[in-house]
Image (spheres, rainbow, N blue to C red):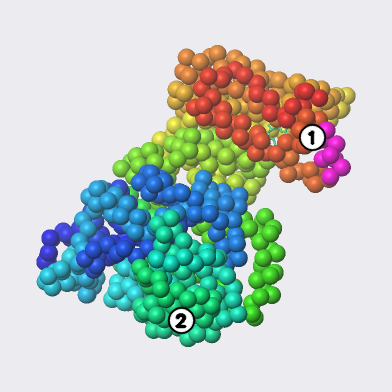
């Protein structure tokens, strides 16, 4: 493939840069069915490990692609920090990989190279891009080859993953607003000498960090307050590092052997657009920042994941041009947010005595769990949208049936991966927690409500924030035509996202309570309770049987009130008794199809209604459980998730008490 003037482009995508970002992009493009050529100016992979940790969101992506095993899998890299103030990144993160994970950049690059090349990406080293021309239907890249020969590559699209001094960014005419360096950090890997480990230790003259690795190599970083940064991209000599280290720490490291030395600074910039027509930027090419805490590499890998799926969808006809625009729309705000937090960290980290008070206040804030969780989510990338890889379930390539769909079903982790679920009444309370829990296990969840569409949208947003998939359906139950209306919307939503209407899991959760003394229950109230709580679930099951495959799951939310008495709820309890009968008889009926049917009986469960804000009332209610607390919605959601999973294949026709031992009191 070289000079080409007319006819089809040589390849679908030219990726410029064979670092981790470019290689991840190349592999994802191949998975999605696109042809890829990667051009890298270096003749050999670098042995510099600039970054060494992976964060939760990146781990999820690599796991989804089946790459974690190849990386070791990466061991925990211990606690993290925010601007040098210790921060436990495991802080209750909504991720399967809370924390930070050790993976030197050289290893990440090697694994990604082998993976992408194994998938058929053509990786050409020693190829330097010198010019770009964008035509209506293609991009031409002028390239100088390894022997100085001039080559020309034609591709449908071109992605610049060529780092902070990106040639593609310059040649492509991308605007790159930002600010220049003010602070500089010298970094060196040294051997042959032992110095104490320290974590961003503050000294009168500056900040020093050192950590000895298992291979005996110590990575040190040092910043001297007030020192003017050197020119961009310079490589300081080791003598300079020794001088600055001695000035800050008082230690002499001149006898050490330098393995690698570099300098970096806090210049920042972000491309105004990540896409200009057929040319894209990802990773450091799109944003330049202080590489603190490994965020630069992680942000770049997440960019690659977000771009790869969309570009492949476009190329293989599963997405349109708007699909490509969504890359910028999604990733630019994420990048801006990361640049913001890095700027804040740089100020905390490299400020002199003038930031001591700020650091003290910050330290106090970080003792609070919500503050820790907030910052940990921010650093780990889990507070933003999860790049749609290898998920093809988003609307933009909703009817996908190509290799990507299969990849998604195979590689997204979770006990319910590839399953679909309906949770009635999931705009709040137990239903919402259940929808979120099932989605966390990988299910695509239909979030049903009656009128509270805002609540349903909030549930969907909560699912999506965790990287799951859900959509809202509204239909009032207990009225004529209710089940028909529900399934019209449900089938439409499923079809749009999966190309079919298979429904694997039905959770009959929607319900209304009575709260009326036995003497006062009117026939209308009684009918309403039965219509919503018993009749609707019956006909939902009847209707769902057309969509449920063998091995499907039906879970009916009953109530502990079928087992213990509360006269105020007699009519309500009767409806729940009816639900248990639905469970029992349908379990027998559907056994031959391996469909399980079970009831879950919650006790008093905090569903967010105002009574649960009253401490005395809560204390009174807590007395019913042997655990002396009221139930939380997730207590029930976890039970439902278990029943929905394959682990519960041998349980059917049963009533699972989920009342915190209320019956034992
Ligand atoms: P909740 O907070 O009151 O939420 C009820 C849900 O059901 C809402 O999403 C609501 O949708 C929906 N819903 C109510 N009436 C509906 C109708 N006519 N048509 C369609 N949807 C309707 O309920 P919860 O406390 O989480 O309870 C969930 C289930 O657990 C119920 O079956 C309940 O009986 C059972 N349960 C609860 C407790 C408890 O202590 N919380 C104890 C035992 C059993 P809208 O928001 O759109 O109205």
- Across and down, in percent, residue 76 comes to 49, 50
Q: Quadrant of residue 106?
A: bottom left
Looking at the rendering, the stretch of residues picked out in magenta corresponds to 615-623
Front position in the image: 482 or 348: 348
Q: Is residue 43 above or below residue 597?
A: below
Q: Residue at x 57, y 33 (%)?
A: 641
Whether residue 324 is visible to the viewer of this picture, yes or no, is no
- Across and down, in percent, residue 225 comes to 55, 82
Q: Disc 2 beta carbon < 8 A from ligand 1? A: no
Q: Main secondary structure of the magenta part?
A: helix
Whether residue 363 is visible to the viewer of this picture, yes or no, is yes
Rendered image: mark on residue 243: 2
Q: Disc 1 beta carbon < 8 A from ligand 1? A: no
Tell me: 590 left or right of 67: right
Q: Nearer the viewer, mark 1 or mark 2?
A: 2
Mark 1 sits on what residue?
628
Q: Residue at x 41, y 73 (%)?
A: 255
Give the quarter of the figure containing the C terminus.
Answer: top right
- Across and down, in percent, residue 614 comes to 83, 45
Q: Is residue 579 above or below residue 144?
A: above
Give the quarter of the figure containing the N terminus.
Answer: bottom left
Q: Is residue 617 magenta?
A: yes
- Where ligand 1 lies, by image quadrant? top right
């Amino acid at each position: 493939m070289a000079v080409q003037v007319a006819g089809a482009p040589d390849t679908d995508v030219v990726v410029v840069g064979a670092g981790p970002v470019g290689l991840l992009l190349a592999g994802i493009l191949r998975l999605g069915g696109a042809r890829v050529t990667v051009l890298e100016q270096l003749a050999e992979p670098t042995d510099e490990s600039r970054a060494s940790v992976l964060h939760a969101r990146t781990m999820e992506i690599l796991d989804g692609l089946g790459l974690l095993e190849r990386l070791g899998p990466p061991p925990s890299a211990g606690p993290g920090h925010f601007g040098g103030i210790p921060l436990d990144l495991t802080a209750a993160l909504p991720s399967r990989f809370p924390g930070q994970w050790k993976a030197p950049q050289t290893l990440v690059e090697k694994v990604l190279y082998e993976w992408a090349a194994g998938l058929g990406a053509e990786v050409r080293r020693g190829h330097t891009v010198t010019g770009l021309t964008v035509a209506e239907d293609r991009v031409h890249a002028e390239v100088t080859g390894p022997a100085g020969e001039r080559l020309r590559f034609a591709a449908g699209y071109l992605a610049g993953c060529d780092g902070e001094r990106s040639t593609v960014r310059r040649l492509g005419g991308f605007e790159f607003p930002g600010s220049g360096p003010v602070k500089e950090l010298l970094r060196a890997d040294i051997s042959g000498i032992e110095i104490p480990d320290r974590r961003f230790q503050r000294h009168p003259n500056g900040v020093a960090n050192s950590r000895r690795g298992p291979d005996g190599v110590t990575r040190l970083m040092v910043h001297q307050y007030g020192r003017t940064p050197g020119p961009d991209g310079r490589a300081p000599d080791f003598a300079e590092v020794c001088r600055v280290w001695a000035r800050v720490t008082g230690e002499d490291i001149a006898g050490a052997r330098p393995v690698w030395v570099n300098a970096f600074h806090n210049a920042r910039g972000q491309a105004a657009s990540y896409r200009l027509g057929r040319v894209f930027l990802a990773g450091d090419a799109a944003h330049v920042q202080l590489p603190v805490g490994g965020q630069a590499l992680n942000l770049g890998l997440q960019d690659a994941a977000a771009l790869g799926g969309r570009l492949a969808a476009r190329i293989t006809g599963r997405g349109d041009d708007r699909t490509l625009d969504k890359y910028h729309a999604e990733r630019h705000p994420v990048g801006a947010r990361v640049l913001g937090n890095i700027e804040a960290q740089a100020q905390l980290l490299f400020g002199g005595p003038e930031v001591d008070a700020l650091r003290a206040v910050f330290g106090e804030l970080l003792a609070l769990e919500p503050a820790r969780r907030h910052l940990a989510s921010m650093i780990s990338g889990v507070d933003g949208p999860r790049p749609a890889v290898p998920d093809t379930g988003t609307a933009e390539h909703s009817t996908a049936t190509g290799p990507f769909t299969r990849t998604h079903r195979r590689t997204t982790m979770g006990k319910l991966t590839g399953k679909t679920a309906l949770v009635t009444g999931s705009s709040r309370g137990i239903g919402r927690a259940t929808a979120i829990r099932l989605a966390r296990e990988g299910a695509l969840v239909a979030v049903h409500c009656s009128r509270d569409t805002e609540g349903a949208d909030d549930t969907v947003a909560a699912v999506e924030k965790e990287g799951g998939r859900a959509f809202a359906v509204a239909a009032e139950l207990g009225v004529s035509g209710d089940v028909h209306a529900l399934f019209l919307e449900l089938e439409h939503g499923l079809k749009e996202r999966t190309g079919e209407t298979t429904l694997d899991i039905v959770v009959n959760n929607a319900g209304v309570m009575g709260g009326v003394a036995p003497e006062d229950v009117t026939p209308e109230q009684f009918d309403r309770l039965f219509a919503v709580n018993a009749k609707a679930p019956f006909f939902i099951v009847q209707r769902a049987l057309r969509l449920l495959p063998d091995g499907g799951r039906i879970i009916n939310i009953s109530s502990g009130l079928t087992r213990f008495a509360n006269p105020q709820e007699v009519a309500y309890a009767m409806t729940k008794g009816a639900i248990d009968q639905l469970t029992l008889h349908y379990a027998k009926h559907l056994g031959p199809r391996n469909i399980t049917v079970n009831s879950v009986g919650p006790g008093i469960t905090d569903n967010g209604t105002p009574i649960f804000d009253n401490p005395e009332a809560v204390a009174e209610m807590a007395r019913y459980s042997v655990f002396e607390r009221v139930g939380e919605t997730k207590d029930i959601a976890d039970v439902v998730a278990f029943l929905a999973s394959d682990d519960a294949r041998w349980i059917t026709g049963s009533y699972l008490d989920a009342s915190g031992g209320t019956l034992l009191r």
